Amino acid sequence: MKTVYWLQGGGCGGDTYSLLSSDFMDVSELFTTLDLKLLWHPSLCSIDPAAHERLLTDIASGTTPLDILMVEGSIIFGPAGTGMFDTFRGRAKKELCHTLASHARYVVAVGTCAAFGGFGAGHAIEATGLQFTKKKKGGALGREFVSGSGMPVINLAGCPCHHDVIAGALMAVASDVPLELDRFQRPLEWYNTMVHQGCTRNEYHEYRVEESDFGEMGCLFFHMGCAGPLVPGPCNKLLWNRHSSKPRAGVPCFGCTSPDFPKSNPFFHTPNIEGIPLELPKGVNRAHYMVYKGMAAEAAPERLKKRSAKV
């Protein structure tokens, strides 16, 4: 039996709610199937404070092995690097994170706050991710950190992270299946394609049939700030609640799997110059893009212009 400790740092707890919405398998069945023992989760465990303190002492001494450390939420360093904005029994939680990570066989950052700092990075609380602050490698554990397995922190980006990604990563590390990571240490298994891929509005994007308001059927990239062509993620392949995704429901993707999420510009506005987005789909040449999109708009089928197809 392998052990799991779930540490909650600075965050909203949304990744826990995401995991709890998993229905295949549900959480209890997942842990049973993988033969995992949940040592602690702030919402799912009820051991008393004294027993929790003994557990931490036993992990620190090596008496209780820690196979998987899951961290949700950012690591808080404020004020002035002390970490005292976020404490556990009077101690800065960042120190607890260091202690647990140094004994863990795998360390998994669950959600964008834990991976990259998220909303608190660059603000008074001095939030960081476990091994990145935004796009800069380092973070709370340092750029050279590797866990007992030899792996760096595994970053499951997302706000929140999709429950199937959390469950899939747990299955992999519980079975010592190697996960190939991208340069921001996100597993390629789930972060090797753009959110755009799988979007039911792709044909509208190809022919530049654009929308500038919510509730319409066309592409949300050109005016509404949709980051689907810009960021990797499984959102249109692993549907939320097995049913839908933000773009499918008419809400622009706001790029929550990106290290620099959230950006300073409004979520639902596409920064542009004369209607040409400043940020183009990954790997696209600007000059070619402008020519291609102009031609594509002229060639758009009438059924798309009339929005006669259901999304």
Image (cartoon, helix red, strand yellow):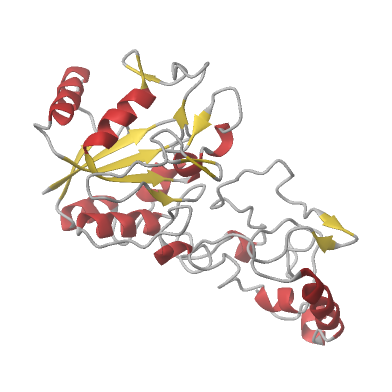
Residue 62 in the image: x percent, y percent?
Answer: 12, 32
In depth, the one of 146 and 307 nearer the eye is: 146
Residue that sits furthest to the top in the current view: 90
Residue 227 in the image: x percent, y percent?
Answer: 66, 58
Q: Residue 72 vs residue 66: left or right? A: right
Q: Is residue 171 visible?
A: yes
Q: Residue 46 vs residue 232: left or right? A: left
The residue that appears at 70% across and 71% down in the rendered structure is 284
Picture quadrant of residue 131:
top left
The residue that appears at 77% across and 52% down in the rendered structure is 269
The residue that appears at 22% across and 45% down in the rendered structure is 148
The residue that appears at 51% across and 30% down in the rendered structure is 127
Residue that sits furthest to the front in the current view: 144
Residue 46 in the image: x percent, y percent?
Answer: 23, 29
Q: Can residue 310 be seen in this view?
A: no
Q: Quadrant of the C terminus?
A: bottom right
Q: Residue 288 vs residue 169: left or right? A: right
Up-down relation of residue 121 to residue 287 (above or below): above
Residue that sits furthest to the right in the current view: 274
Picture quadrant of residue 65:
top left
Residue 200 in the image: x percent, y percent?
Answer: 62, 73
Up-down relation of residue 125 to residue 181 (above or below): above
In depth, the one of 81 and 191 nearer the eye is: 81
